Image (cartoon, grey):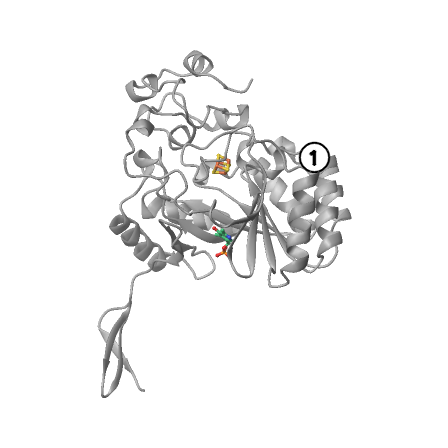
């Protein structure tokens, strides 16, 4: 049984003070925890890293810094549910629903709000927009989680998009490999195969902790790769969940071993209600530097911040470049000392 209310939660876990104080009356992201997610939580560990991502806390209410829409997605919504911020790529908000709601969700203005799935009229408008905007080369099918939508409807949406523009790369963005692995039935893979024409699909997963990578999720990854869909992982740096180089290195190595390329490690967005999960940027940069020392280039994700007030994504990394003089450029070596590179 899914956990949907605080009562459900109290029956299954001994709540900590801040969890007990969380009030359902506040207008915020609802509780939703799937059985699979619950099975990943160690009920005897009050600080369990999976629990922190899904069990709400009253600290969410104490966030006076965050904003409801820090990426200014509403301003960049060029057709309903269609966010076109960067020239060559856009986001389609397929649905507001997920199999479990993450307390760090950066799209809280939209997620779990009962807006529902993308409708035919909205698709028509998006179809017309992408026909007019030939600069769009990629669309992120996001939400919410697109795989909460039925196979039949996914089939309709994908064939609609492919009929309008089959040269656009489609990114399948989902956390369902972590929250609801049983969703990935054979019929879904037939639907994907049927709609594989033109530009490729990529799978964008969100594994935030090594324990989220299970035999079930690896099985699904293998099925995607079998039909030629390459997986990339986007994780979020979260306080008390994965804010150490040790956990990040373990996560990245496990992802790569299972053929998932670590793509982004996001600094938590400045979203209202997520203050208790945000990691200080300086600490994030230290973790990044340590990761880069210990991980191969293939295993290393880009530590990235989506700037507040819709400022866009920037990669945050230790700066080895020192400066220049008449002899050339000075660059610090990761092995110690510095080197000159001539002009
Ligand atoms: C992150 C993001 C993208 C994709 O950016 P990449 O750097 O290509 O992964 C596209 N549109 C919006 C609005 C985004 O926030
Ligand atoms: S799965 Fe994604 S959209 Fe859904 S709650 Fe988690 S972060 Fe938000």
Q: Position of residue 281 (x, y in %)?
A: 28, 49
Tell me the quarter of the picture where residue 180 sits. Answer: top right
Q: Is residue 176 left or right of residue 337?
A: right
Tell me the quarter of the picture where residue 335 sits. Answer: bottom left
Q: Position of residue 229 (x, y in %)?
A: 65, 52
Residue 200 appears in the picture as rendered: no
Q: Position of residue 60 (x, y in %)?
A: 33, 29
Q: Is residue 294 shown above or below 110? A: below
Measuring 75% from the left and 47% from the top, which residue is drawn there? 159
Which of 51 and 275 lies nearest the eye of the viewer? 275
Measuring 31% from the left and 44% from the top, which residue is drawn there? 244
Q: Is residue 157 left or right of residue 104?
A: right
Local SS, label 1: loop
Q: Quadrant of the C terminus?
A: bottom left
Q: Position of residue 78 (x, y in %)?
A: 55, 50
Measuring 45% from the left and 33% from the top, which residue is drawn there? 102
Q: Is mark 1 within 8 Å of ligand 2?
A: no
Q: Quadrant of the N terminus?
A: top right
Residue 234 appears in the picture as rendered: yes
Q: Residues within 10 Å of mark 1 (few under 14, many from 20)?
A: few
Task: Find disc 1 in the rendering and name its residue.
Answer: 185
Q: Is residue 82 shown above or below 14? A: below
Q: How many marks?
A: 1
Which of 157 and 3 lies nearest the eye of the viewer? 157
Measuring 54% from the left and 37% from the top, which residue is drawn there? 144
């Amino acid at each position: 049984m899914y956990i949907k209310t605080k009562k459900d939660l109290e029956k299954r876990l001994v709540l900590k003070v801040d969890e007990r104080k969380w009030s359902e009356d506040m207008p915020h992201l609802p509780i939703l925890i799937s059985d699979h997610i619950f099975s990943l939580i160690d009920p005897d560990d009050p600080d369990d890293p999976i629990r922190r991502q899904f069990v709400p806390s009253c600290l969410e209410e104490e966030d006076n810094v965050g904003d409801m829409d820090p990426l200014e997605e509403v301003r960049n919504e060029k057709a309903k549910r269609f966010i076109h911020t960067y020239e060559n790529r856009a986001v389609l908000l397929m649905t507001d629903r997920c199999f479990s709601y993450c307390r760090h969700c950066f799209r809280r203005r939209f997620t779990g709000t009962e807006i529902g799935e993308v409708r035919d009229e909205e698709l028509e408008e998006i179809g017309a927009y992408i026909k007019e905007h030939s600069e769009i080369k990629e669309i992120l099918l996001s939400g919410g989680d697109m795989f909460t939508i039925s196979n039949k409807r996914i089939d309709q949406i994908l064939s609609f998009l492919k009929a309008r523009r089959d040269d656009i790369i489609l990114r399948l963005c989902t956390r369902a490999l972590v929250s609801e692995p049983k969703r990935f039935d054979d019929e879904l893979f037939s639907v994907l195969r049927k709609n594989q024409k033109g530009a490729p699909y990529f799978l964008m997963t969100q594994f935030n902790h090594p324990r989220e990578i299970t035999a079930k999720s690896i099985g699904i990854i293998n099925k995607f790769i079998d039909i030629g869909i390459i997986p990339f992982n986007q994780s979020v740096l979260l306080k008390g969940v994965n804010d150490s180089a040790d956990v990040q290195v373990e996560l990245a190595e496990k992802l790569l071993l299972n053929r998932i390329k670590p793509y982004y490690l996001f600094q938590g967005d400045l979203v209202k209600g997520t203050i208790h999960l945000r990691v200080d940027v300086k600490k994030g940069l230290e973790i990044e530097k340590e990761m880069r020392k210990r991980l191969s280039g293939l295993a290393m994700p880009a530590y990235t911040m989506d700037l507040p007030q819709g400022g866009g994504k920037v990669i945050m990394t230790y700066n080895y470049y020192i400066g220049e003089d008449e002899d050339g450029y000075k660059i610090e070596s990761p092995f110690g000392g510095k080197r000159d590179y001539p002009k």
